[in-house]
Image (cartoon, rainbow, N blue to C red):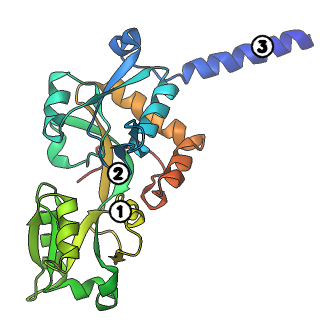
Amino acid sequence: MIRLTVVALVFGWAMANSAMAIELPAEITKRGSIRVAIVPNYPPLEFRDPATSALSGFDVELGEALGRKLGVKIEWQETSFDQFMSSIATGRVDAVLSGMSDYASRHETATFVDYLRSGPHFFVQQSHAAEFKDTAALCGKKVGASRRTSFPVQVAAWSEAHCGSNPIQFVGTDGSADARTQLRQGRIDAAVQGSETLPYIMDLEPGAYAPVGTMFAPGFTGIALPVKEKALQQAMAEAVDALIADGTYRALLAKWKLNGNGIEKATINAGQ
């Protein structure tokens, strides 16, 4: 009787876990891999290790962990940022996991499984930090940020909401590295960096920069997936939640100093 009870319990456990198994689209299961687009130029989310040239960063480790959870291999495919959406739309890749912001304007082309909170953050030279004790001190100043991002629009909206007749003078730059160069040269008074990358930049150049205020215009970073692939979207959301539940996600956040950007549960198309 005891033996039968044990067998029944084991069988019931197996059935319960089978019902909870994450199901992937048949094509991906047959292939045994998920093709994922990446541009490794956004540390600490994705970059090439200077010593080994190997792909590294939070997104890379998260992607590999998701692959293990889903029982498939992750095939990283390097591309350019401007090819992300077309790669998803044409089926050249199954997903984009590369620090991509979830915006409502992108939802017609891709569905996002959100896995990080993100948003722009003002910063200044450490030597001028005393002049910027709060964000109000930015009004009327020259603030630089990459013109290829959403930062210009977000800074303009923040300025309109907080600066009145003394608006920020926005300076578009050729990327975040150029913004930091102009800041060091004194051509701008402050710069803007993603909240997920600013701590990394500050670690690279100790004592060079100081953050001002907190993240503004908060949003989400997501895994971009084809709109029609509902099964893949559900599987990816469940896999993210499973990594949150087993502690893997929190460990990765801590390793890459992203604790302030963590989420409690995966969301789908939560970006505005």
In the rendered image, is residue 109 in sight?
A: no
Say left or right for 272 vs 264. Answer: left
- Quarter of the rendering occupied by the C terminus: bottom left
Q: Amino acid at mark 3?
A: Ala
Q: What is the crowding at mark 2: few (fewer than 14 residues within 10 Å), some, or many (at least 20)?
A: many
Identify the disc placed on residue 43: 2
Q: Compare residues 53 and 101 and report the one nearer the observer.
A: 53
Q: What is the crowding at mark 1: few (fewer than 14 residues within 10 Å), some, or many (at least 20)?
A: some
Q: Compare residues 251 and 130 and report the one nearer the observer.
A: 130
Q: Position of residue 68 (x, y in %)?
A: 51, 26
Say which element carries label 1. Answer: helix
Identify the disc placed on residue 8: 3
Residue 255 position (above or below residue 135):
above
Residue 264 position (above or below residue 5):
below
Q: Amino acid at mark 1?
A: Ile
Q: Position of residue 189 (x, y in %)?
A: 19, 81
Q: Compare residues 53 and 202 and report the one nearer the observer.
A: 53
Q: Are marks 2 and 1 in contact (CB under 8 Å)?
A: no
- Quarter of the rendering occupied by the N terminus: top right
Residue 267 position (above or below residue 5):
below
Quickly name the residue at label 1.
Answer: 201
